[in-house]
Amino acid sequence: MIYQNSYAQLDARLYHRQSPTPLTNPRAGHFNSEVADLLGWSSETELMERWVDILSGSYVPNGFEPLAMAYAGHQFGQWAGQLGDGRGLLMAQVLDQNGQLKDLHLKGCGLTPYSRMGDGRAVLRSTIREYLCGHALNNLGIKASDALGFVVSDTPVRRERMEPGAALMRVADCHIRLGHIEWIASFAPDLLAEFTDYMIDTYYPDCRQSDNPVAAFLQSVVERTAKMIADWQLIGFAHGVMNTDNLSITGSTIDFGPFGFMERFNPGWINNHSDHTGRYSYQNQPAIGHWNLNIWLPHFMRLPNISRDILAECLAHYEPTFMQHYQQGLCQKLGLPHSQASLQLAFEWLTLLEDYQLDYTNSFRALSALVRQSSEIQVTEHPLTQEHETALLATLKQELSADSESTQVWQTWQSQYLALISANETSSMLAIKEALTMMQQANPVYILRNSMAQRAIEQAESADSSHQHGANSSNGLAEVDRLYRLLADPYQVHAFAIISDTQPPDIDAPALPISCSS
Ligand code: AMP
Ligand code: MG
């Protein structure tokens, strides 16, 4: 691997150098060979042979320079002061096979000076959720951290109950959070200029071409954040804890805690059960992104050539960038060109999904079957895809045939939709095919439903407890592996999928409680 530990060269007040605290009796959880190949990890015999030792913290290879980063943040709208890596360490920074900088960050590897009241550990449950979520988002095409793998251990960790301790090697383009600047502003303001130069040179080198590189950098952070949140809204992702310490300066999704993927469409959905006011509900995410940037930007007024007006101009890019990406993406999900008429129809569709509590992912995907069936021309698809989409459309129609009102709403909407589809020069086979391709690339078949993650967790935990009692059992990670393979290619129908992979909860089912406790 090509090490480039540039963060470790920065001022020593910004971090604390230390080694991980090993887990007891570690065992392999899951290993992501694609990420390993990308990093160049796979070509090093020692790293491949000792990956469990490395992830469990008992072995630190040459080239690694582990450190805990200091940062601060606003949590749930309140200034929280100093936070920092309380249970994770930046182990190394490397150049991947594409020449991109990647951070290797080990989460769950023991106490640091920033642990506050915590124990420095992560539990198996949340480690599996983070592992699968990063993998899912990356393969859905959303910028996010991924992971090299995770290990499980006999280290007991107390949450609401005792749980097995685990550790995950997170791989992300960057671990600098908005909260890093908040920390510097409060605790080491003399470092702001140097740190800003580091962020620009490392992550936004193109901004150096601008007359005002800092302003160009800030505008780019604003735009990338807006784009990331538009991607979340389109795929139905709710982060759950959008504190300023959980937002990266590169617009990559990081810090998976009580996240969720939208099932039955409800814009007010609060996935995080600790979020009593719904601050981080799905529909609030775009506004919270703006709130976070608004509280972040003024720190840069300390720098020369940055005025309040310049910052206001940077922030003014947020809404149009969000709108552009979100609206464009919504039209794509319907296979329509970006236009007022398409958007009008898209918003009516979302209202329909909300009113009748339809599954967000399945309903969008079902429209492919509608378009295919309505076209005069025979469009052939892979039989599995065709069968799956046809079944989704049948379910959609059935759920909408509950009463005469819903039937009427659906009839009206679908005829307007099909009129727009065919108005869009789609009378030719090529155009219909293009619309279908566009839709199938924007509407996944599989997302990580809470119930899917839960099943994998229960299997892993029960195998783990029989292991502890000395029973001879498999390591219980077969379901994690199955989901890993399913989510590696979420836009295609897979023969090994099971019904629950595409099944929303019953309308009256109580929500699975997902809390911050991880
Ligand atoms: P999070 O909610 O995971 O983003 O964490 C917020 C802050 O609390 C960060 O500074 C974390 O490092 C810290 N933290 C969370 N859980 C623990 C833990 N079990 N032990 C130590 N620090 C923790
Ligand atoms: Mg965090």
Image: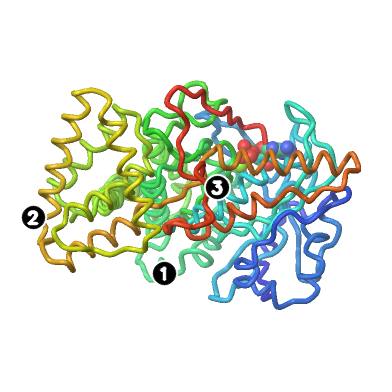
In space, the residues marked 2 and 3 are separated at their CA atoms by 51 Å
Protein image colouring: rainbow
Residue 267: quarter of image:
top left
Give the labeled residue for mark 3: 181
Give the labeled residue for mark 2: 423
Q: Is residue 477 left or right of residue 241?
A: right
Give the mark nearest the N terminus, 2 or 1.
1
Give the mark nearest the N terminus, 1 or 3.
3
Q: Is residue 95 visible?
A: yes
Instruction: State the SS at label 1.
Output: helix
Q: Quadrant of ligand 2?
A: top right
Above or below, 151 against 348 in this view is below
Above or below, 8 against 339 in this view is below
Mark 2 residue type = Ala
Q: Is residue 269 left or right of residue 276?
A: left
In space, the residues marked 1 and 3 are separated at their CA atoms by 21 Å
Give the residue displayed 10% in from the left and 62% down from the top.
Answer: 427
